[in-house]
Image: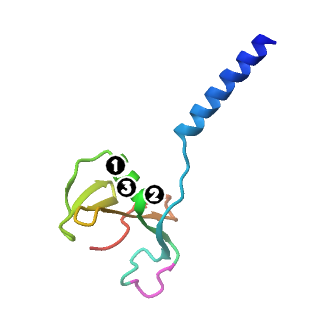
Amino acid sequence: MKRITIFILITLVVVSMNSQAAEWKPLSGIYAVTAENYLDPAEGEPDNTHYRLQLDGAAAEDLFHALPSPVSMDECTGTKQKISGDMKCLYYEAESRYECAFSINLQENRIEYGVAC
């Protein structure tokens, strides 16, 4: 009986550690399904090739800090940015606000830029 109790306690500790390591959280932001050139699509260009995301709040803050890149200045907004490939996160210091933008190219299954400057 004592061994079963110890086994159950160890199992509960391990399960609880795994659930904390992969904590799922709600997202805040907006999205759109668009053409590749969403600002000025060519005639006949499919309008559903990219899933664009703009995250804000805690989701954007967590992604900003998780990106493995140095902080630099964004030329469009004059605020702090971190970029990894085509994924970009901004930190608006005066407002203490984070924002991230990227798109998923649905045809090629890869991350691309999210919004134009």
Q: From the viewer's side, name the closer residue of 109 and 29.
A: 29
Lateral position of residue 35 relative to residue 24, left or right = left
Instruction: Say which of marks 3 and 2 sits in front.
Output: 3
Q: Secondary structure at mark 1?
A: helix
Rendered-image quadrant of the N terminus: top right
Residue 9: give x, y in percent of width and height.
Answer: 69, 22
How crowded is the residue under tag 2: few (<14 C-alpha within 10 Å), some, or many (20+)? few
- Location of residue 102 (image quadrant): bottom left
Q: Which label's residue is closer to the chain start, 2 or 1?
A: 1
Write down the region rendered in magenta. 41-47
Q: Which residue is mark 1?
A: 65
Residue 61: give its label.
3
Query: Mark 3 vs mark 2: which is more N-terminal?
Result: 3
The secondary element bearing badge 3 is classed as helix
Residue holding disc 2: 110
What's the residue type where badge 2 is placed? Arg
Residue 42 in magenta?
yes
Seen in the picture, residue 14 relative to 73 is either above or below; the reply is above
Q: CA distance from mark 2 to mark 1?
A: 21 Å
Which amino acid lies under the numbered mark 3 shown in the image of this protein? Answer: Glu
The local crowd at label 3, few if under 14, some if 14 to 19, many if 20 or more residues have their Cα within 10 Å, is: some
Q: Are marks 1 and 3 in contact (CB under 8 Å)?
A: yes
Rendered residue at 34%/53% (across/down): 64
Q: Residue at x 48, y 85 (%)?
A: 44
Q: Residue furthest bottom?
A: 43
Residue 57 % position (x, y): 41, 62
Residue at 35%, 71% in the rendered image: 115
Closer to us: 12 or 47: 12
